[in-house]
Amino acid sequence: MVDWSHAGGTVLAAFLASLVEFVEALTIVLAVGTVRGWRPALLGTGAGMVLLLLLIVGLGPLIAAVPITWLQVSVGVLLLLFGLRWLKKAILRAGGVIPLHDEDAAYAEETRLLQVSGRSRGLWDTIAVTTAFKAVMLEGLEVVFIVVAMGATAGLLLPAAAGAGVALLCVVLLGLALHRPLARVPENTLKLVVGVMLAAFGVFWVGEGAGLAWPGGDLALPALALGFLGVALAMAALLRRSAFPTLREKRA
């Protein structure tokens, strides 16, 4: 039985991480559908989603069979590294060192590339199908890792998958309603929040696997998250005030 009362953090982390990745995949799929046609775009998307689902179904039981202490340490380290990578990008963007991710610009660039690519002469548009498939797979693999790692380690695979599923449903419905990239989604803020959560979970599980008794038990997770958030915000503020050449200065 799933203890849903303790699944909130796992569900939220899976939902937010999946939301970011699915928004990026949607941008490319929309470009493929607009330029090359919706049939190949949907075929590539469907194939990618089926393969991702098979990975989740196949990897979940395999990871669950690993001894829990080994799983907590190994997956904890991977989640920590994964979270720190997201945090690094969010901090550099918030500090003005690198530009914010722009879904409209990404859509325009993908549209340009698809327009200059040669069209298939038959009914099967290989370029369009492959482009949509690759977008879903590349972005979705990160979702699979987060869902399987967090779900299997905490014994909450179903809640983690539910969080990712809700994110997918939201993105699909918005894409169908708007037919344009979700440029207003605060992606950098989401990356910062998800990076904080993944890093906190990673440290917590490494400690659990090493036999550390966290003060307050699960209440240590919010404290770890606040610590990572405080450090990230402080570093972003320092970058904005430092002599490090910012994006605005490079353009000047």
Image (cartoon, rainbow, N blue to C red):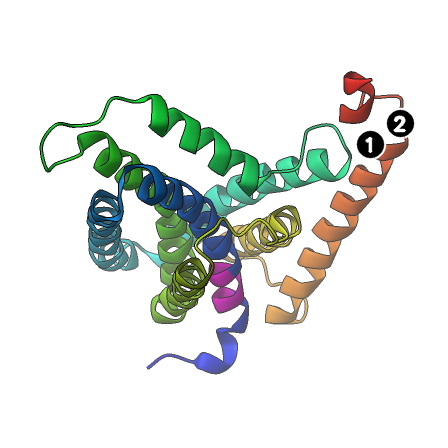
Quarter placement of the C terminus: top right
**In screen coordinates, is 133 left or right of 182?**
left
- Callout 2–callout 1 Cβ contact below 8 Å: yes
- Quick check: can you spot residue 233? yes
Name the secondary structure under disc 1.
Answer: helix
Residue 164 placement: quadrant = bottom left
Q: Magenta segment, which residues?
A: 10-15
Q: Nearer the viewer, residue 21 or 223?
A: 21
Say which residue label 1 marks. Answer: 239
Name the kind of residue labelled 2 in the image.
Answer: Ser
**In screen coordinates, is 248 left or right of 168?**
right
Say which residue label 2 marks. Answer: 242
**In screen coordinates, is 236 left or right of 142?**
right
The residue shown at (35%, 43%) is 34
Q: Neighbour class for label 2 at 10 Å: few (<14), some, many (≥20)?
A: few
The residue shown at (66%, 51%) is 189
Name the secondary structure under disc 2.
Answer: loop
Q: In the rendered view, tell whether residue 202 sits above or below residue 99.
A: below
Q: In the rendered view, tell whether residue 176 sits above or below residue 25.
A: below
Label ID, residue 56:
none
The residue shown at (43%, 54%) is 179
Q: Nearer the viewer, residue 60 or 114?
A: 114
Q: In the rendered view, tell whether residue 118 sits above or below residue 14.
A: above
Q: In the rendered view, tell whether residue 21 sits above or below residue 208.
A: above
Q: Neighbour class for label 1 at 10 Å: few (<14), some, many (≥20)?
A: many
- Quick check: can you spot residue 69? no
x and y percentages locating residue 7 in the rendered image: 48, 73
Name the kind of residue labelled 1 in the image.
Answer: Leu
The residue shown at (61%, 53%) is 184
x and y percentages locating residue 36 in the rendered image: 28, 37
